[in-house]
Image (cartoon, rainbow, N blue to C red):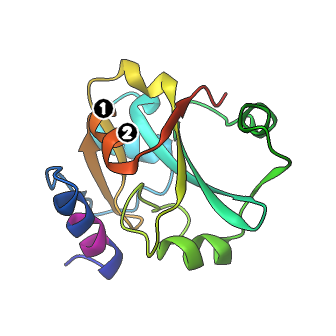
Amino acid sequence: MDSDAVATVRHALLAAGAADTVATFDTAVPTAAAAAAALGCDVAAITNSLIFELDGAPLLILASGAARVDVGKVAAQLGTGKIRRASPGFVLEHTGQEVGGVAPVGHPAKIRSLLDESLSVHPVLWAGAGDHRSMFSISYEQLQRITEAEEMPVR
């Protein structure tokens, strides 16, 4: 049975005109490495939904599971001050989802989003679907469209 967060993600995908490709696993897949192992794909095709705090507001960076986000580089590209990793409470408050299962969609309110350009080389991407046991597949183009994310190098 879906958690409420997964049901919300499913609804958001369908409402955005994307397919419901949510897959739920018997065991948790809270990291990109665990997800890639369960899916049999390259860790670089896993899309981490990382929440940062920027001037008190959430910033969602959709980054390759093989990449470490360079927040200094991102801040310079945005022309802003310090970006810092958000606390688990801040993530839950702004996404309705727990760290390790955050999806790119299905949040209570729109979150400014950035999309790691390095993900564009993968025909199929996998992203968290709202909890630690669920993922969904999507193309880079569809992910950019449904999140309205700004494309940029983030590493």
Position of 119 with respect to 2 (left or right) is right
Residue 105 at what x, y percent from top left? Answer: 38, 59
Q: Is 9 included in the stretch rendered in magenta?
A: yes
Residue at the far top in the pictured view? 121
Given the image, on which type of amino acid does mark 2 rest? Gln
Q: Identify the image quadrant of the C terminus.
A: top right
For the N terminus, give its image quadrant: bottom left
Residues under numbered marks 2 and 1 in contact, where contact means CB atoms less than 8 Å apart: yes
Query: Counting other residues with Cα less than 10 Å from the Cα at mark 1, is it few (<14), some (14-19), or many (20 or more)?
Result: few
Magenta segment: 6-10
Residue 138 among those drawn in magenta: no
**Residue toward you, 133 or 145:** 145
- Residue 107, given in percent of the width and then of the height, sits at 43, 69
User: Horizontally, is 100 left or right of 35 in the view?
Assistant: right
Instruction: Count up the numbered dots.
Output: 2
Residue 120 is labelled as none
Label 1 sits on residue: 141
Q: Is residue 77 left or right of residue 31?
A: right
Residue extending farthest to the front is 79
Relative to 20, say whether 6 is above or below: below
* Residue drawn at point x = 19 percent, y = 62 percent: 15
Looking at this view, name the residue that lies furthest to the right: 81
Q: Amino acid at mark 1?
A: Glu
Q: Residue at x 41, y 46 (%)?
A: 148
Q: Secondary structure at mark 1?
A: helix
Q: Nearer the viewer, residue 93 or 134?
A: 93
Which sits in the foreground, 39 or 78? Answer: 78
- Against 92, residue 37 (above or below) is above
Q: On the picture, is 110 further left or further right than 66?
A: left
Name the residue beneath numbered marker 2: 144
- The answer to whether residue 40 is seen in the rendering is no
